[in-house]
Structures are given as structure tokens and as C-alpha cells.
Amino acid sequence: MAALVMPELKTVGALVAWARQSLVQAGVSNGAQEAMWLLEHALAVRSHQLVSHADRLVSPDVLVYAESLVARRVAREPLQYLLGTQEFCGLEFSVSPAVLIPRPETELLIHHVADHVQTLSDATIVDVGTGSGCVAITLAARLNGRRILAIDRSPEALVVAQRNATRHVVRDRIEWLEGDLLEPLRDLQGADSVDVIVSNPPYISESDWAGLEPDVRVFEPRMALVGGEQGTEFHERLLRESREFLVPGGLLIMEMGAGQAPTVRQLAEQIGGYAALRIIEDAAGIERVVMAQRVE
Ligand SMILES: C[S@@+](CC[C@H](N)C(=O)[O-])C[C@H]1O[C@@H](n2cnc3c(N)ncnc32)[C@H](O)[C@@H]1O
């Protein structure tokens, strides 16, 4: 007769201690805190209950799930993919490995787009490379009455974005387009008809990509990260191609990487068609956002 193998039982307290030790030993920065977040999620409890329920036994299936999450984090899978969410501008977004995890510095785009359109009641705004939809959805949630289009080349990303839009009740306020940069606009928009083109494009150079932390390089979509040999290839294309669609005085606003501002500035001058170029620094003092206004 086959021997029955009993799963090892653990109390909540023992599980917490094991998870903390595993993440800290694996060198996960903030490992002790992340252990608590993962276990709150796996056990579906509040953090204080991880302490007050320390003597309770964890049910075998929950234990297996909790241990698998900790093992995946030890293997450097990003916390946000394990928890399934990331906050952006005060809204919660579902994330999966099909999309880039929204970053806090991208919130700068929202503030400057909102500023630009505040006096334009019927503005058209295009979010290029929408990913999780964080930019388009936040703008739709904040700005009533504006027409918002969201483009991505990845159909999988668009599925995630539309799910997020449903969650924030703006699914029907956004037009969803699959395709390469501004190409999908050709069938929809005439020339000179867009007030704002906003983009957080892929901007890591091929050589920098190889040196990224495994959390990013192994798990986040390469298509969302790598811009090409230089990293500024998408900025160049957007500067070139946006001129056809922007109204006079319309704004192209893009996120960029540390040290890319001089190249982007030079590209804008070579390409021409833009008046003032404004560079905005992020909270860390890095030149992060470029604003190019089409000549009137
Ligand atoms: C850096 S991510 C930005 C995602 C999201 N907007 C954010 O800020 O978190 C870049 C996005 O551009 C998309 N993308 C890459 N190449 C593209 C292309 N040629 N045309 C349209 N979208 C593209 C990727 O799929 C990805 O979702």
C-alpha cells in the first residue's frame, strides 16, 4: 500500500518568519516588507492579522500558494506581477508580464498633458504605447469631454489596458488601436487634428538592456523597454511623424531616459517643425520629460 505523504503544516507565524528570511537572504531589497505584502495577498488577510493569527495553522493549499509566491520573488519576478497590481496617480492598475509596470516618474506626463488641455474643452489626445493603459485611463478619468485614443503594437497589452479601463469605468471613453506608433491614426484622423501626442516609449538602448536588473530584464516585456541601438529611436520617429497629425501649437510630450535629453534636443532641431522645447526633471533631478510644441 502506498504511504500517504502529509503536507508539512506551518503556522502563520512560522510562514512569516520563513518568508522574511528567504527574501532577505536572497538579497531582495525591502525583503522583510515584501514578505508581508506577499503573505497578506496569499492569505487574503490584513497585515496586523499576520501577527494576531500567528499561532493559526495555514491551510495546505494556501500554504502551497504562499510558498510559490515567495519562491518566485526569490527568483526575482517583480512583486507587482505577483500581486497583480500597481498604483499610478492614485488609481490601481492590473499588471501582467504582457505590460510594463507603471513607474512613478511617468505621472509627470499626466500633469503636463492636463495643464496643456485645460483651456481646450474638446481636445484630442493620443497615448502611444499605452501598455497597461495607465496614461490614457488616468487622463480619461481626470479629463471629461476630451477624445482619447490609445495605441499599442502589442495585442496582449491592449487586453490588459482595456480590462483596466473597464475597472475605472472609462472603457468606452477611449478608442483602442493596435499598430505601429502613429500608423493607426492614418485611417482615423486627418492631418493637423490632434492636440496632444503623449508617449512613454521604449527608451533603453540595446547595450544598457543587457545590464538591467534581472527583475526588469528577465520579466518585463522587451518590446516595452528597448528603443534600439541608441535608445532614442522612438523619440526620433515620434518627433518626425507627429508633425503630420498635430494641430499648430499642438504638443508632443514624451518620457525619456537619464542622459537622453541632449540627443532628443538635437533630434528636434534637426527634424524641425517645433517651437519651444521644454525639458522637465523628475523628483530625482533627472531630465525625464520632453515637451515639443508644433510651430503655430
Ligand atoms: C515603456 S512602455 C509604456 C507603457 C505605459 N504607457 C506606461 O507608461 O507604463 C512602451 C509601450 O510601447 C509599446 N510599443 C513598443 N513598440 C511599439 C510600436 N512600434 N508601436 C506602438 N507601441 C509600441 C509596448 O508594447 C509598450 O506597451
Image (cartoon, helix red, strand yellow):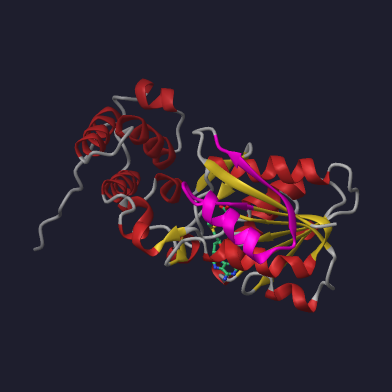
Q: Which residues are magenta?
A: 254-282
Q: Where is residue 239 drawn, in percent x and y?
A: 66, 63
Query: Which image quadrant is residue 244 in?
Result: bottom right
Q: Quadrant of residue 110?
A: top right
Nearer the observer, 125 or 260: 260
At 43% from the left and 64% from the top, the residue drawn is: 222
Seen from the viewer's position, the closer of residues 179 and 172 is: 179
Residue 84 makes an appearance in the image: yes
Query: Does the segment drawn in magenta span residue 157?
Result: no
Image quadrant occupied by the N terminus: bottom left
Check the image and report above or below for 260 versus 245. Answer: above
Residue 200 visible within the image: no
From the top left corner, tell me how far across and down residue 259 is, in percent: 47, 48
In terms of depth relative to the viewer, which is nearer, 284 or 36?
A: 284
Which of the image's four quarters has the C terminus?
A: bottom right
Residue 76 location in percent, x, y?
Answer: 30, 49
Vertical comparison of 89 with 61: above or below? above
- Quadrant observed for ligand 1 in the rendered image: bottom right
Name the residue at 63% across, 41% down: 108
